[in-house]
Amino acid sequence: MLSAARFQFERIVREYAVWRTVDDRERSPAAAWWWGPALAVLDEPEAMPPDFCRALQLPPGSTFARAASVFITAIADQTSLPWPDEFPRIRRRDDRGASSELTDRSAPSQPHAPRLMAATTTDALGS
């Protein structure tokens, strides 16, 4: 297995383990970003390390391919996906439907990402 695929898969195993610890009523939908790393190991017959098996609640010696099906099953039947800031737990909203931490859905998901101002054509041309 390529080290990049293994690195990404290890990341989603950790996220999955944390996600599963959240109470069902507060748990967000499964993360859509799990799809790519899961598909990358879908045909991988190599056995996973024991800690991966435990985190995914699979028997010892389970393969990466078997683990991929855990992620695909978690995502497949969903009708909505979580916002990155609502993973792994759904944020409680006030009566107006606004989150106490983030009220602007258009805000960048990365806290340090610069906000770019859209320039009109005339601004860009200097007219």
Image (cartoon, rainbow, N blue to C red):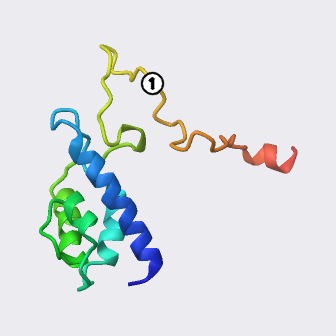
Task: Tell me how many marks there are.
Answer: 1
Image-based side of 115 in relation to 73, left or right: right
- Up the image or down, 19 lies above or below 49; here it is above
Question: Going 41% across and 20% down the picture, which residue do you hit?
Answer: 100
Q: Position of residue 56 (x, y in %)?
A: 20, 60
Q: Residue furthest top?
A: 95
- The residue beneath circle 1 is 101
Amino acid carrying label 1: it is: Glu
Q: Residue furthest right?
A: 126
Question: Going 15% across and 56% down the picture, which residue do you hit?
Answer: 77
Question: Going 26% across and 41% down the picture, which residue do you hit?
Answer: 28
| Disc 1 secondary structure class | loop
Q: Where, by quadrant of the figure, is residue 50 drawn?
A: bottom left
Q: Position of residue 78 (x, y in %)?
A: 19, 52
Q: Residue furthest left?
A: 59
Tell me the quarter of the image containing the N terminus. Answer: bottom left
Tell me the quarter of the image containing the C terminus. Answer: top right
Asked if residue 80 can be seen in this view, the reply is no
- Up the image or down, 104 lies above or below 127; here it is above
Question: Going 16% across and 62% down the picture, which residue do you hit?
Answer: 73
Image-based side of 76 in relation to 51, left or right: left
Image-based side of 37 in relation to 27, left or right: right
Q: Position of residue 43 (x, y in %)?
A: 25, 84
Q: Position of residue 62 (x, y in %)?
A: 17, 75
Image-based side of 71 in relation to 126, left or right: left
